[in-house]
Image (cartoon, grey):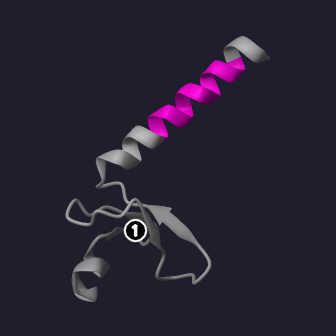
Amino acid sequence: MGSENRDNSWIAGRIYFDRKDKRIIVKRTQSPFSCTMNFGNKWTWIINAIFIIIIIFIVVFVL
């Protein structure tokens, strides 16, 4: 994938969405030390849903 296509995958410079890119974690181009998730990958949504379910479980049943 060329850098031209990669640049078009950024929404507002912060959200990365590219269905053809199989990576879940993507290095941000603006900052050399930060990463973001590829919201075009279905596994990103599954991981985020599991994380939210765990947080809700902790809030409801533990606190």
Residue 27 position, x and y percent, is 48, 74
Q: Could you tell me which quadrant the N terminus lies in?
A: bottom left
Residue 4 position, x and y percent, is 24, 86
Residue 29 in the magenta stretch? The answer is: no
Question: Residue under circle 1?
Answer: 12
Q: In this view, does 29 lie above or below 23?
A: below
Q: Quadrant of residue 2?
A: bottom left
- Magenta-drawn segment: 48-59
Residue 41 position, x and y percent, is 30, 53
Label count reads 1
- The residue lying at 26 percent from left, 66 percent from top is 21
Q: What residue type is labelled 1?
A: Ala
- The residue lying at 69 percent from left, 22 percent from top is 58
Q: Could you tell me which quadrant the C terminus lies in?
A: top right
Q: Is residue 21 above or below residue 46?
A: below
Q: Residues within 10 Å of mark 1 (few under 14, many from 20)?
A: few
Residue 59 position, x and y percent, is 70, 21
Q: Is residue 51 above or below residue 2?
A: above
Q: Quadrant of residue 39?
A: bottom left
Q: From this viewpoint, which residue is outermost toward the bottom? A: 3
